Image (tube, rainbow, N blue to C red):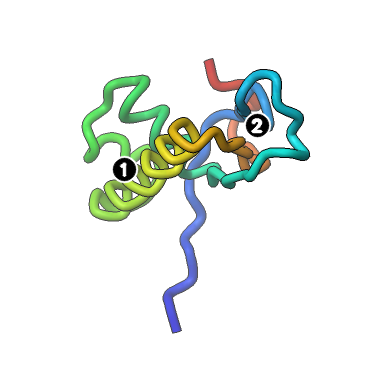
Amino acid sequence: MPRPKLQRRISCRPAYSCYKPNGVPMSQLPTLMLAADELEALKLVDRDGHNQLEAARQLGVSRQTLGNIIASARHKVAKALVNGMALELEPVTVTEKETTCR
């Protein structure tokens, strides 16, 4: 049996609940779910430019776990873009200050 997933430190709420190709109704699109920790990892490493060790500390996971989370998130984003799929963002409960990712 796998270990239980540790709670991750998510610092902001995404501005939107999904991203999809323009001009196609959501009901006609296959969807992929992007977890809150995957979005946070992308934000910390790719947008904010933190190295993986610093991003792992902020997320509350090991560097190896962060690497796995980022790999999964990048795979999902690339798959959605290439295959014209909708990307649904997991709802987030922000425990610290309530902010929107900017």
Question: What is the x, y in percent for residue 94?
Answer: 63, 37
In-image side of 25 versus 75 (left or right): right
Around disc 1, counting alpha carbons within 10 Å, would you say few (fewer than 14), some (14 to 19), or many (20 or more)? many
In space, the residues marked 1 and 2 are separated at their CA atoms by: 25 Å
Q: Residues within 10 Å of mark 2 (few under 14, many from 20)?
A: some
Q: Which of disc 2 and disc 1 is earlier in sequence?
A: 2
Q: Nearer the viewer, mark 1 or mark 2?
A: 2
- The residue type indicated by label 2 comes to Cys
Residue 45 drawn at (x, y percent): 31, 30
Point 31% across, 52% down: residue: 68
- The three-letter amino acid code for the residue at tag 1 is Ala
Q: Position of residue 60 (x, y in %)?
A: 39, 47
Q: Residue at x 40, y 36 (%)?
A: 78
Secondary structure under the numbered disc 2 in the rendered image:
strand
Residue labelled with disc 2: 18
Q: Quadrant of the N terminus?
A: bottom left
Which residue is at the front of the view, 61 or 24? 24
Instruction: State the image coordinates of residue 12 (x, y, percent, origin top left).
Output: 56, 29
Residue at image position (32%, 47%) is: 66
